[in-house]
Structures are given as C-alpha cells and as structure tokens.
Amino acid sequence: NAGVTQTPKFQVLKTGQSMTLQCAQDMNHNSMYWYRQDPGMGLRLIYYSASEGTTDKGEVPNGYNVSRLNKREFSLRLESAAPSQTSVYFCASSEIGLVEPTRQPQHFGDGTRLSIL
Amino acid sequence: GDSVTQMEGPVTLSEEAFLTINCTYTATGYPSLFWYVQYPGEGLQLLLKATKADDKGSNKGFEATYRKETTSFHLEKGSVQVSDSAVYFCALSAYSGAGSYQLTFGKGTKLSVIP
C-alpha cells in the first residue's frame, strides 16, 4: 500500500512564483490535513478537510489555499511564494468514524521540502 | 486552547541506556494521546497511542501511560538502540468543532543514540 503520497519531494522557487503541492491517499479516509514543519516549531496545521467537499483553516492559513479535489486528493497552493514559506510540508489523512473518532491516528506522507529564494 | 509541552532536546544516550521523554498536555474534554516518530528524511509514523485515563500504549519496546491526574504521557524505553535515533513528537487529538478532530503537536525531541 502506498498510503499517503506527496509530490514533488523537493522544490525550489523564487519569491512571487506560484505552485501547487499534491497529496493523494489510498486508504479511503474521510479527513485530510496539511501541515508545515519548521525547526523548533513542531508541526503546525495549515488547512484541513474533514470530509470531501469541506475545507477549513488551521493555525497558519495565511498565504495558502487548498482544494479537496475528491475523496483521495487534497492539494495545497501557494499563490505568491515568500521566503517565510520555506519549510517542509506534510500531508496527512485519517478515518474519522462516528464512534470514538479521537482515537483514530493520522497517517503522514514523506513530505515536500520547499525552499523559496 | 489545547497544547502539548515536551522536553526540549537534543537528547544523547549511549546504546542500552534508559530513555524517558516527558510530555504534558492541556486540553478540554477527553483527548486521545499519541507518540509519533520521525526518522531522518521521512514523514511521521505512529509509535503508540492511549485513548483513556490509565491506558498504557506500547510498541517496539516503547511505553507511555495516560495519566489524567498529572496530565502527562511520558515516553519510556528500557534499552535504546542506535536505530531509535529519531525525532519524537507527543500529540493529542480532540474535537475542534464542526465535525472535525485535530492533532495538536509538541515541538519534538531529537534523540541520538551512540554505540
């Protein structure tokens, strides 16, 4: 099983350029998430999608947009990249059922390492 | 809001030493608690979890007990190996409204085990 697949794995952009990070999961999960990981900051939630057709802001949404394309795919877009967005980006998914939903762990991709010059 | 505090690293241990990484949390309601591990160049992997008070999660020789009275979930291993070198994240899962559930992470503790 592939689990959660992120593309690309590495990317270098110039300030002001745009790009889309892709994420796909093959576990039939309802919920998907985008995080950024910065040194000494842990993981911070950018956006999430509780179910197909819904998206909501997380802790650090400014400068980003998302699209839940279908149940499998959840993309993150940087419209005008800034050096402060240099980070490692992780996509995750989880199955949130009706019974004891907080018990369900999130499954992570391997990350996209993004540098903005 | 919810928060997780874990001991700052880095932590350097000799092989076969005892490991403790402290984690405390603040949350309303009844969260589930998790430890994730991140090996160099990889994403996070679930290491263990506990979903109610006094539960003990365990995996690969690691253990952590959900202590509601001290709001803690400390990670322990009796004898670490070089292959345990990684960054460890403590996290809690709680309801965040509108049918969604979010993870709140600690900042991570980097463990290096030397032969």
Image: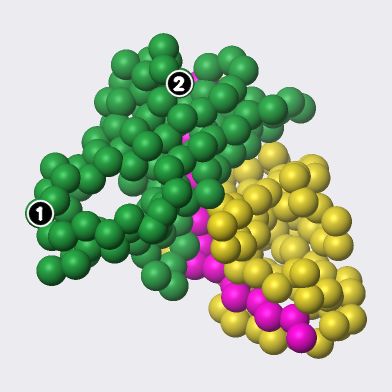
Chain colours: A yellow, B green
**Relative side of A5 to B59, left or right:** right
> Which percent across, then down, holds residue A78?
82, 70
**Relative side of A33 to A57, left or right:** left
Quadrant holding the C terminus of chain A: bottom right
Q: Nearer the viewer, residue B19 or A109?
A: B19
Question: What residue is at 62 percent from the left and 36 percent from the top?
Answer: B102
Quadrant holding the N terminus of chain A: bottom left
Calculate the distance from the C-alpha at mark 2 to the C-alpha at mark 1.
Answer: 29 Å
Q: Which residue is mark 2?
A: B71
Tag of residue B16: 1
Tag of residue A70: none
Q: Is residue B50 above or below residue B110?
A: above
> Which SS class for mark 2?
loop
Q: Are marks 2 and 1 on the same chain?
A: yes
Callouts 2 and 1 close, C-beta under 8 Å: no
**Which chain contains the residue that carries disc 1?**
B
Q: Say what amino acid the circle numbered 1 marks.
A: Glu
Question: What residue is at 60 percent from the left and 33 percent from the top?
Answer: B3
> Which SS class for mark 1?
loop
Q: Is residue B85 above or below residue A115?
A: above
**Which chain contains the residue that carries disc 2?**
B
Residue A25 visible within the image: no
Does residue A114 show up magenta in the picture?
yes
Q: Is residue A59 above or below residue B50?
A: below
What stretch of residues is rendered in magenta? A99-117
> Which percent across, then down, holds residue B24?
46, 30
> Which percent across, then down, holds residue B72?
41, 26
Q: Say what amino acid the circle numbered 2 marks.
A: Thr
